Image (cartoon, rainbow, N blue to C red):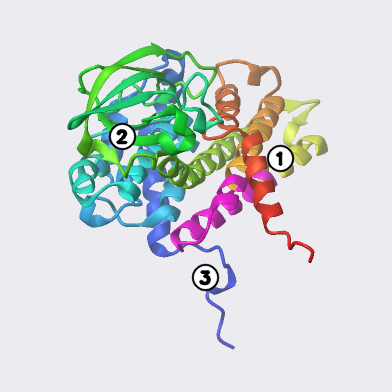
Amino acid sequence: MTPTPAAARDPFALSAEERSVRDTVREFAQREIAPGAAGRDAEERYDRALFDRAGELGITGLPYPEELGGAGMGTFAWVLACEEVAAADMGMAVSLSVHVLSQLCIFSSGTDAQRQRLLPPMTAGRHLGAFALTEPQAGSDASAISLAARREGDEYRLNGNKIWISNAGQADVYVVFGTVDRARGRDGITAFVVERDTPGFRLGAREHKMGIRGTTAAELVFEEARVPVENRLGEEGDGLKVALGALGSGRIGIAAACVGLARAALEHAARYATERSQFGRPIAQQEMIQAMLADMATAVEAARLLTWRAARLRDAGQPINAASSMAKMFASDAAMRVTTDAVQIYGGAGYSRENPVERFMRDAKGAQIYEGTNQIHRLIIAQQLLDAVPRGG
């Protein structure tokens, strides 16, 4: 009887190319990103050199076509890479995820000329991207955007503020959402590419965050900022479609980052449990600790499978709204549970900044909030479910 190939037995087996991506990024992340993660967290410092190295390895343009300088490998390969980066440093994973998200807006909604001009430096890792949607009164309700965009000839003049913008101050290219007419509501929202040296555009107050401190978040200030018409993405009024289309895919990257974060917490907790002794034996021999580790491992695997499913659907061109919300919601909730349990297994030592699980727990909390709070994702999932219920006749 001919043995069944391993790949045929395991429907989730990675291809040789996918394993190569995962292993290459894991080696880079553990060698170059992980050693300085605690220091960058303590200093709230972004290391642009790590982004540059990621660009040299092709990570910064992994899902985009080769003709635009990318690796042409799709969302699933990006998910594998993002998990490995997050297992080393959630801050760097978030920075890269936002970078990939900002490119998606240009790739999906830009003209051929915009893609050819803007994307190659981004896919190569020479230009860092940012995604600027959130405002003081427009967080979960993106349709409430008030940043004003007034057309004057061949330019738009932007006035207003954005807040909590990841990569702010470090980015070279910002995808910014404003409104050409607030009276039009969501139909007035328009997307623009704002380059860092744009007149009238500057960095505002920087946020000092609980976690994910290895990447910046700050306010953006627009005071008669002059943006050429050729930097508009799509038509006037297309902005919300541009944003929501990109965010649907961006959630998959965040889910992958949460898987990596949770996996790192599990690995640290399991190792500590074998090394720490109480009552004359390693705490790993205590049934209560074993039960915690089992639940943690199951949560990591379940989060990974939901994330992989969403990525496969995205690469197949299938609808992903519910799938990406499920992955982001479940994976970030799982990361919060797993990192909290890791701190508990460490005991008092886990409450100290001398151990990485304390940082993991702080990082996990942020993931439940950004790119749509998990409450919003539950609403998205429920609405998709209810819309599919057959109506009685």
- Is 302 part of what is drawn in magenta? yes
Q: Residue at x 59, y 22 (%)?
A: 358
Kindly identify the amino acid type of the residue bearing the numbered disc 2. Phe
Q: Is residue 270 visible?
A: no
Q: Residue at x 73, y 32 (%)?
A: 282
Which residue lies under the disc numbered 2? 192
Quadrant containing the C terminus is: bottom right
Kindly identify the amino acid type of the residue bearing the numbered disc 3. Ala
- In the picture, residue 114 is in which quadrant? top left
**Disc number at residue 94?**
none
Q: Can you give x and y, in whole percent of width and height, for residue 195 in the image?
A: 24, 29
User: Is 202 placed above or below 67 here?
Assistant: above
Q: Residue furthest bottom?
A: 1
**Disc number at residue 7?**
3
Q: Is residue 375 left or right of residue 136?
A: right
**Disc number at residue 293?**
1
Q: Residue at x 46, y 19 (%)?
A: 41
What secondary structure characterizes most of the magenta part?
helix
Q: Can you give x and y, in whole percent of width and height, for residue 281 in the image?
A: 76, 31
Looking at the picture, tell me which residue is in the foreground, 319 or 275: 319
- In the picture, residue 179 is in which quadrant? top left
- Is 18 part of what is drawn in magenta? no
Q: In what element is the residue under mark 2?
A: strand
